[in-house]
Each structure stands twice: as structure tokens, then as C-alpha cells.
Image (cartoon, rainbow, N blue to C red):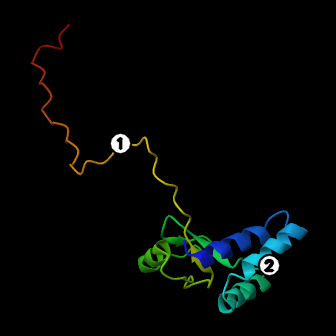
Amino acid sequence: MHAIMKALVRIQTLEYGPEAESAATLAELEQLRSQVPPQILGHYDRLRARGKKGLALVRNNKVCAECNMQVPIGTVVTIIKGADIQLCGNCGRYLFVEETPPAVENAPAATGEPAEKPKRGRKPRKKAGSDVG
């Protein structure tokens, strides 16, 4: 994830957290806010001043979690690559995608070969009169 977005996600987490007014939280918030460019921080603060969250999660790589509108796939790809910061076209929040955990080491390695299809044979027919009992 883009470093600026990581800082914004952490800022929003701290601002909505239970310890939002503690001295340690305020110091961390100040340090994080210094890492974000003023234009981005200004937009984020305007949303917060209206009582809205400044960030929205993209659920299932296609829907803004705050306004429930579909996000264009090009926008999602840009976010995933970390190439740029994107806004939701509907609600104006900064969009982010949750980072996926690394793959489990015990998972079987892909060989590149397609899996064998099960053989499809016909079921044996019942002979006439075999059901008589």
C-alpha cells in the first residue's frame, strides 16, 4: 500500500479509536499527519469536519464500503499497485484496499499444469427385471 495511504489509515484508526484523546495518541497523530501532503490532509480534514470518515475500504475489490457504489476496476488496480491515491467518484473519500496476507508456506505449489479432469463414464444400466425381488 502507498505510504501516504498507510499513514491516513492509521490516522483514521486512531481518530475513531477509544484512546482518541490520550496524549500518546495525539503525539502519534501529529507525527503521522506530518507525513501526509497538505492537499491530501486538507481534503481528509474537510470530510472529517462534515462528520464523515475520510477513507473508505474497497470491499471485494469492487465496492466502496461507505457509499456502496461500484468502483471502476482501473481505479482498484491503481490502488492495489500503489501507483496513485484514488478518490471514490461518488462520495469523495480516499479509497484503500486491505493488504492480503502472504501465502501460506504449506500450500501446495502450482506446477503450471492443469489439473486432471475426472473421467466421465456412463453409469452401468440396470437390466430389465433386476429390480424384481
Q: Nearer the viewer, residue 133 or 113?
A: 113
| Number of other residues with Cα within 10 Å of mark 2, as a class: few under 14, some 14 to 19, many 20 or more | few
Element class at badge 1: loop
Residue 98: name its quadrant. Answer: bottom right
Amino acid type, label 2? Glu
Q: Which residue is labeled 1 in the image?
A: 108
Image quarter (top left, top right, bottom left or bottom right) of the N terminus: bottom right
Amino acid type, label 1? Pro
Residue 50: name its quadrant. Answer: bottom right
Query: Is 40 located above or below residue 6 in the figure?
Result: below
Q: Nearer the viewer, mark 1 or mark 2?
A: 2
Element class at badge 2: helix
Q: Position of residue 90 (x, y in %)?
A: 57, 84
Residue sitting at 44 percent across and 45 percent down? 105
Which numbered circle lies on residue 30?
2
Which numbered circle lies on residue 131?
none
Number of marks in picture:
2
Image quarter (top left, top right, bottom left or bottom right) of the C terminus: top left
